[in-house]
Amino acid sequence: MTGSFPECLFQQVTIIGVGLLGGSLGLVLKERGLAKTVVGVGRRQANLELAVEVGAIDRFVAEPQEAVRESDFIVLATPVDTYLSHVQGWGQHVPSGAVVSDVGSVKGQLVFDVEAALPTTAFFVGAHPIAGKEKSGVAHATSQLFDGARCIVTPTPHTNVKALAKVRRLWEVAGSEVVSMDPMVHDWVLGAVSHLPHIAAFSLMHALQDLQENTPEALSLLDYSGGGLRDTTRIAASSPEMWRDICLANRENLLLMVDHYIAQLQAFKQLLRDGDASGVVRNIEQAKVLRERLG
Amino acid sequence: MTGSFPECLFQQVTIIGVGLLGGSLGLVLKERGLAKTVVGVGRRQANLELAVEVGAIDRFVAEPQEAVRESDFIVLATPVDTYLSHVQGWGQHVPSGAVVSDVGSVKGQLVFDVEAALPTTAFFVGAHPIAGKEKSGVAHATSQLFDGARCIVTPTPHTNVKALAKVRRLWEVAGSEVVSMDPMVHDWVLGAVSHLPHIAAFSLMHALQDLQENTPEALSLLDYSGGGLRDTTRIAASSPEMWRDICLANRENLLLMVDHYIAQLQAFKQLLRDGDASGVVRNIEQAKVLRERLG
């Protein structure tokens, strides 16, 4: 049935890394008939077996070369710091005209590095579906994950126009609103709206641990938290490996952004120290107005 | 019907400030037959009319003295920095043996100050139901608001034992788990688990505004946010007046707590600056373990 689907974009897709994002993309490709065959590549056999079971991939292989050399679409869905070693491992086997893409949260220089590491006959298109959960793994994969989300594609001056159109179409069929952005601008934008809030949440959990150590009685601070703390720190439970890589890959932006954040916390402290009631209320009012724009 | 309820704790209750918390408490008192009559006091007539309409109060008065002098239970549900001026206004009219309580998010010295401002024949019991929403106003009041929440009561050496038992019972019937805590310890605990996360969220919204001003293209950062930023900053849309008062009333603790938070952000920055991948992953793993305790 999938072969006769009016819009079969790809013959064989290889997904490198079949976790939440890779698995959800596999489900989209299969359920919407966008690919004849989806092959998974990964480190853990049990995970790949589960991916077959839930219908995210048709089969899996131990050696990526084997799948890559017969694929017209290859997607990197592993932590971003593994991209270059992956591409160095199988780049030379990518068929001429095949499209290579990814789903990573960091673009910037990495996009240019991956482009440079691939043969000039292969076409790289960076893509970042802004979707995810704090739960990782193919067990949580769903073809609805990208529905209503934005997907940022990050073409460079070298990007092949047809390859870009195919990747855009894939994400449109997945239900996403596709936006094009310079790879460097992408990292600034995502640093601000995603990576910085993650660091804020990680550090808030650590601050609470510090405060617990200074708590005068044998009581557990976390027993007294309400929904506010739970919401504010939900993303602190994200995958440590994934976020290590994102934070390090985008560290130049993040060092500056954390400084902006610290400056704002210092400014709030100053208002408190001065007992400046109208300054405090103005600060919170402005925060509220900004927050309400988020919906 | 309410009069014949097996557990009518109070004859007439006066609620000063009929917003989300005061209104929800009124609904509990009425629906569960804990009081024969509930009288509302407030500044805005339209709000008080709405409170009558939704069944949170039976009637309202313009002058608090009038209601207070015939009440055996008076609840302060206004911003905490108004407590003293309220009590100075009608304290002398509180009948002998009547119980005065509150629902405020700050206790500490304020509890001792309110005690001292009341006649010795009136019994003050500080109470803080840890419940709320980012939506304020009696329009959002519900008798379920306190269900499953914690309520902290903060007795002092002067607290009347029977008055304390009545207030505890009220909150138990409201569905809350009642915990007793020293007023000063209360402010430390709530500073950590509630007030600090609010400041973190306010400052994060301001940092995003700073970053927007530094954004190289005509694009709106907030257009690219996902669920992470929305959750992390949800509480930034809280009531500015309420949070001004909380932050200022608890500022000694908060100045220290924001410093702990800034120190953790600096520590994360140092890991990024050093490119310390194992340090970054360890930091995030610890945050994740702590966060997972929150459920």
Image (cartoon, coloured by chain):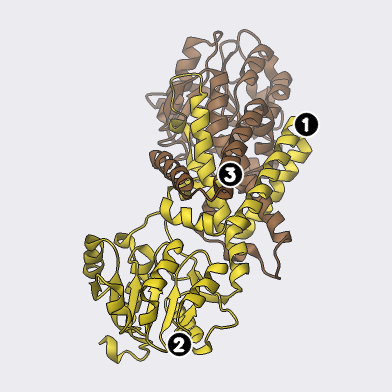
Chain colours: A brown, B yellow
Residue B284, by quadrant, is top right
Discs 2 and 1 carry the same chain letter = yes
User: Do we see residue A129 in this rendering?
Assistant: no
> Above or below — where is A6 with respect to B279?
above
Q: Are marks 2 and 1 in contact (CB under 8 Å)?
A: no
The residue under label 1 is: B274
Disc number placed over residue A27 in the picture, else none: none
The residue under label 2 is: B121
Q: Secondary structure at mark 3?
A: helix
Q: Position of residue B132 (x, y in %)?
A: 43, 61
* Residue type pointed to by label 2: Thr
For mark 1, does the 10 Å Cα neighbourhood hold few (<14), some (14 to 19), or many (20 or more) residues?
A: few
Return the chain for callout 1. Answer: B
> Above or below — where is A192 with respect to B26?
above
Q: Position of residue A129 (x, y in %)?
A: 50, 31
Question: Marks 1/3: CA distance?
Answer: 30 Å
Q: Position of residue B50 (x, y in %)?
A: 23, 64
Disc number placed over residue A270 in the picture, else none: 3
Which numbered mark, 1 or 3, is in the foreground of this view?
Answer: 3
Name the residue located 62 percent from the left edge and 38 percent from the top edge: A262
